[in-house]
Image (cartoon, grey):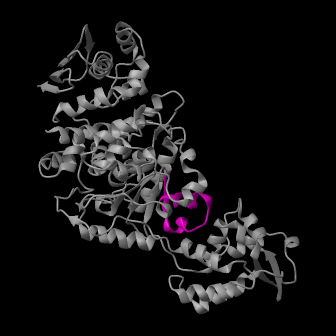
Amino acid sequence: MDAKDLEKYSSAITLSDMEVFVFPELMYSLVLANIMSPLLWRWRQVDCFAKLEGKTSYRRLMRMRQYIMDEFDFNLDLETWGLTKQETEVNRFRHVISPEQIAGSNALFGYTGDQYYFDVDIRKHFGLDKYNGDVIPYWKTETVEAMEAFRFRPGYDRAAGECVSLATLYAAASFIVCGIPLEDIYLILTPLHSQNFIDMQDGILTNNRRLVTKTMWFNGTEISYKAQRALRNEQVTIVAHPTGYIHCFYDDATIDPKAYDRFIGRIGEYLRTELSITSFASFLRCHRQYQEHFQICRDCHGQPQFLKAETLFHYEHGSPYKIGDATHDKLLAEVSDEDFVRHEIPGRVRCDRLSDFLEKDEPDLREPAGREALRRFLEPHVPEAGRFVELLTDFVHIRPRLPGRQKSFKAVEPVKLSVDQSREEIIAQLQSRRQSNPTIDLAFYAYRDMDTCDWRPFVKAAIERNPVSLERAGSKPLDEVHAWLGQLESVSIYDGNRLAQPDEVANYGRGDGLEKAFLLANVLRRRDPDRPLGLIADRDKVIVRGKQEFAFQSAKTLSAQVDIAEDGTIQVKR
């Protein structure tokens, strides 16, 4: 493993936002690591899922949405995994990607998005505005074990994770619990967000803890509009799939071109809808400033009655019925008679005539003629009708900025797993494909499989990218740090011979003796970098040697000798 590979493989351990951006295969490696995790396979035994055995994948997916919303929080604490420096991170990856490209596409390095993001002050929204100097937070992605372990952190009573963690969780759980083939799941990353497109029915997007169907996408509610934010306003940087990935900056892509073409077509269908009175009403629900230019007309015993559109939208709040869909008349029945008037309200478009126009003329807003026809219809009553039509066009026809198709597609062996396989069969199959597929090999590092992986990436990550444990140790004497570690619960968040990183031990207040030993090694390395450091794991006994010697007891059954030289060179004997 040369220096470049060591950087990539150690990145599979820490999985920061920056690392996933630079090494796009890591995104799918984490999905596979979660698929191998016993935690997700236990979800099958949860009552709400066990009762749905034999039901459709769609129904199970809808139930899983509620389960994730009940059991997981969205964690936006950027300092969960400590702080690093821009210069440090840029220098790590100069051999792969230029600092200019990083700054133009990563929120921690200056990216602010297009005009929409300036308008809503997105950096302040995410808490990035206070990081204007060289110091920036590690924005790390959690394994499912680390997400579950948030329950042990002060202030949390549920599992948690940020957007990339939730996207990879949804992808893995959709396969294991819902029986959705991996080939139907595409992971989509933008500079400020991560979500999945599931090729099922009319398409489904995951969005943090939620799912958004096509109907929900175009319903004009605040929640749906926020879910659209990334695909409406950001360049998609990475699309990942079991056949590979495509990256907006890299000339080479490994995704199957046919799979990518299918994704382009299917998400394009998902992101557009026909112009109808239903979609028109959804647009007005989203753009409230235009409601005052429309009125609703109903028949009352053969006589027309009129109602201000904004009044009817007000009645929607708290009602199961919606304007413009099959429940429209039921909503009208809830309106007080006093809100109707018997005369047409001047200066407003009548929605019954608008509906007739849309059905008869069928204006296609993708064509100049269609937009002009609608503009002329609205112009007598809607100020700046041209601008109105532009916004409406953008509402019903979203054009995502996807990585260009002009890439050099390099064929790699795809990940082929069946929803009918057991966990043991999947792990065995992935193990047999490690040499032929780098993404699969990296998955075992993200999975922390210390029995079969080279230890050097784990050690490199442990002593270079775990600032929280250093902060917790502070300036305490080493004997006090050792005593503090001894007081932490001696239970690993990972089963078997898988290992937590030092900051996972520090954040969750628990860890096996071997994991605690690596935390102490991190502290020793930082305090005395000019002194060689050694760690000896002999199954149940672990020794850390620096200027002093410290002992730990381990429930893991691992054996290895780790030597870290003054220059940071790592050697491992097993």
Residue 421, magenta (yes or no): no
- Residue 161 horizontal/vertical position (percent): 44, 41
Coordinates of residue 323 in the picture (x, y in percent)? 68, 72
Rendered residue at 52%/44% (across/down): 70
Foreground residue among 410 and 493? 410
So how many labels did they put on this image? Answer: 0
Residue 534 appears in which quarter of the rendering?
Answer: top left
x, y percent for residue 190? 42, 55
**Closest to the observer: 213 or 405?**
405
Residue 426 sits above or below residue 411 on the image: above
Position of the N terminus, as image quadrant, is top left
- Left or right: residue 289 compared with residue 17: right
Q: Nearer the viewer, residue 463 or 504?
A: 463
Q: Position of 42 compared to 530: left or right? A: right
Looking at the picture, does residue 375 appear above or below residue 525?
below
Quadrant location of the C terminus? Answer: top left
Is residue 363 visible in the rendered structure shown here?
no
- Residue 375 visible in this rendered orientation of the protein: yes
- Furthest-bottom residue in this view: 360
Residue 251 placement (x, y as % from top left): 25, 61
Q: Which of 415 and 478 is in front in this view?
A: 478
Q: Is residue 99 above or below residue 117?
A: above
Magenta extent:
210-230
Q: Is residue 229 magenta?
A: yes
